[in-house]
Image: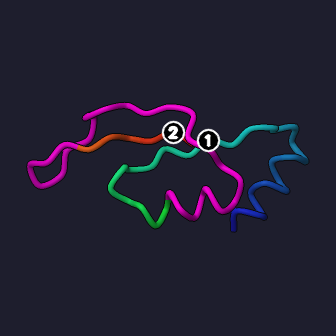
């Protein structure tokens, strides 16, 4: 799916894809790292689930 989104985005002139990921979702962070994404920003303690705060990681 990611390859499809990248390919179709390039056709439309999109050169940058961003992902906003919960800092608790290490599987998604690993997936994006493996596919060339790097952390470019982090919003600290902006998410909350079951009473616990977490960061949102921008890749």
Question: Which residue is tagged 2?
Answer: 58
| Colour logic | rainbow
Check residue 46 for magenta coloring: yes
Question: Which residue is tagged 1?
Answer: 18
Check residue 40 for magenta coloring: yes
Residue 28, position in %: x, y?
49, 62
| Relative height, residue 44 to residue 54 (above, below) | above
Q: Residue at x 14, y 48 (%)?
A: 52
Quadrant location, the C terminus: top right
Q: Residue at x 58, y 64 (%)?
A: 31
Q: Residue at x 38, y 41 (%)?
A: 56
Q: Is the residue marked by circle 2 packed among few (<14), some (14-19), or many (20+) residues within 10 Å?
A: some
Q: Residue at x 87, y 46 (%)?
A: 10
Give the SS element for disc 2. Answer: strand
Q: Which stretch is magenta? A: 29-53
Determine whether label 1 and label 2 are within 8 Å by CB.
yes
Quadrant location, the N terminus: bottom right
Give the SS element for disc 1. Answer: loop
Q: Is residue 18 left or right of residue 36?
A: left
Q: Is the residue marked by circle 1 packed among few (<14), some (14-19), or many (20+) residues within 10 Å?
A: few
Q: Is residue 9 left or right of residue 24?
A: right
Residue 51: give its label: none
Measure the C-alpha gap from mark 1 to mark 2. Answer: 7 Å
Query: Residue furthest toward the left?
Result: 51
């Amino acid at each position: 799916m990611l390859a499809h989104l990248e390919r179709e985005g390039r056709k439309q002139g999109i050169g940058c894809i961003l992902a906003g990921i919960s800092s608790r979702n290490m599987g998604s962070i690993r997936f994006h790292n493996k596919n060339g994404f790097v952390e470019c920003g982090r919003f600290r303690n902006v998410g909350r689930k079951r009473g616990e705060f977490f960061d949102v990681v921008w890749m």
